[in-house]
């Protein structure tokens, strides 16, 4: 699934950049048309999966917490609960929520999960902020597409490197290696970017290279943490 996601990110920006270089109006209509078309394609794909996997149509028995919440939705029981006890209804709603959060904070992969979430709170990637900055420096849409193309090829390589490394040294150590890799190249790119006083466009090259290489660490760490989370869930099940 990661590879499918990255391949889509690889092709789409490059195609749109070539179209945008010819006609911006046509590029906008192309994006609109592909978005509307994808809705129908996604619906058909979801329907096929639903029919292929019969288990999806089975009614899952609610656990005790969700069952209590559903029962509390009955108007008569809500009124009875309010009359009998002022805080009983509050406990019915809060207990499942607090139990889930308590289970999460007691998980052995809590720190890894939090660090993975924080990794994506960054502008050091080819998102809208980075693209806007490069456009302001004078890079053309085609050059930005090429930068993104190189970045996604590198990220795609991480989806092959991560499983190989995890099979050699385990998911914990591979996660540490990948997060160290990301820090080194991202920090180096930012440091060189701040130290150099060259032409703004030339000054951005070390930053671009550092961001591209750091994505290997990000996706490798992502896959390592996802493996750990799934492993913990299997053990608990």
Image: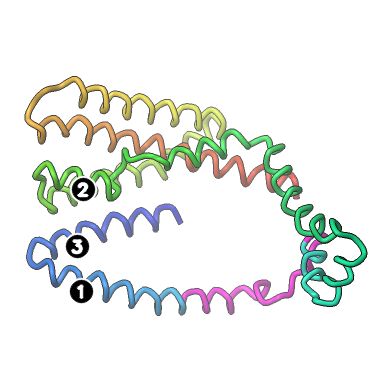
Dot 3 or dot 2, earlier in sequence: 3
Within 10 Å of disc 1 (Cα), the crowding (few <14, some 14-19, many 20+) is: few
In front of the other: 120 or 61: 120
Which residue is drawn at the image coordinates 26% and 59% (left, top)? 11
Does 73 sit left or right of 22 as displayed? right
Which residue is drawn at the image coordinates 36% and 37% (left, top)? 216
Can residue 55 be found in the magenta stretch? yes
Give the image location of residue 229, x and y in percent.
61, 43
In front of the other: 179 or 90: 90
Label 3 close to label 2 by CB (< 8 Å): no
Which residue is drawn at the image coordinates 59% and 33% (left, top)? 111
Between the residue at mark 2 and the residue at mark 1, the CA separation in whole angstroms equals 21 Å
Can residue 179 be found in the magenta stretch? no
Which of the two discs, 2 and 1, sits closer to the camera?
2
Kindly identify which residue carries mark 1: 29
Q: Identify the magenta region.
A: 45-65
In front of the other: 47 or 128: 128
Q: Note whether 59 is above or below 214 in the view shown.
A: below
Which of the two discs, 3 and 2, sits closer to the camera?
2
Between the residue at mark 3 and the residue at mark 2, the CA separation in whole angstroms equals 16 Å
Q: Can you tell which quarter of the image residue 130 is in?
A: top left
Kindly identify which residue carries mark 3: 16
Dot 3 or dot 1, earlier in sequence: 3
Counting every numbered tag in the picture gives: 3
| Circle 1: element type | helix
Q: Note whether 42 is above or below 186 in the view shown.
A: below
Label 3 close to label 1 by CB (< 8 Å): no
Kindly identify which residue carries mark 2: 132
Give the image location of residue 181, x and y in percent.
39, 28
Prevailing secondary structure of the magenta residues: helix
Between the residue at mark 3 and the residue at mark 1, the CA separation in whole angstroms equals 11 Å
């Amino acid at each position: 699934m990661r590879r499918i996601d990255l391949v889509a990110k690889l092709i789409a920006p490059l195609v749109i950049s070539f179209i945008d270089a010819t006609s911006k109006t046509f590029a906008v209509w192309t994006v609109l048309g592909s978005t509307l078309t994808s809705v129908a394609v996604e619906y058909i794909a979801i329907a096929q999966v639903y029919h292929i996997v019969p288990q999806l149509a089975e009614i899952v028995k609610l656990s005790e917490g969700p069952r209590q919440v559903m029962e509390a939705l009955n108007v008569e029981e809500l009124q009875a609960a309010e009359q009998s006890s002022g805080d009983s209804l509050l406990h019915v709603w809060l207990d499942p929520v607090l139990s889930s959060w308590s289970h999460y904070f007691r998980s052995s992969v809590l720190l890894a999960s939090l660090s993975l979430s924080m990794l994506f709170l960054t502008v050091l990637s080819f998102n809208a902020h980075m693209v806007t900055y490069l456009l302001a420096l004078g890079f053309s849409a085609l050059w930005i597409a090429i930068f993104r193309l190189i970045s996604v090829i590198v990220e795609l390589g991480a989806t092959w490197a991560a499983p190989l490394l995890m099979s050699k040294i385990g998911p914990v150590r591979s996660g540490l290696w990948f997060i160290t890799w990301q820090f080194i190249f991202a920090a180096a790119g930012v440091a060189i970017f701040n130290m150099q006083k060259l032409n703004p466009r030339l000054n951005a090259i070390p930053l671009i290279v550092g961001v591209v290489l750091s994505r290997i660490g990000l996706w490798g760490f992502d896959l390592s943490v996802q493996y750990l989370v799934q492993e913990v869930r299997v053990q608990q099940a």
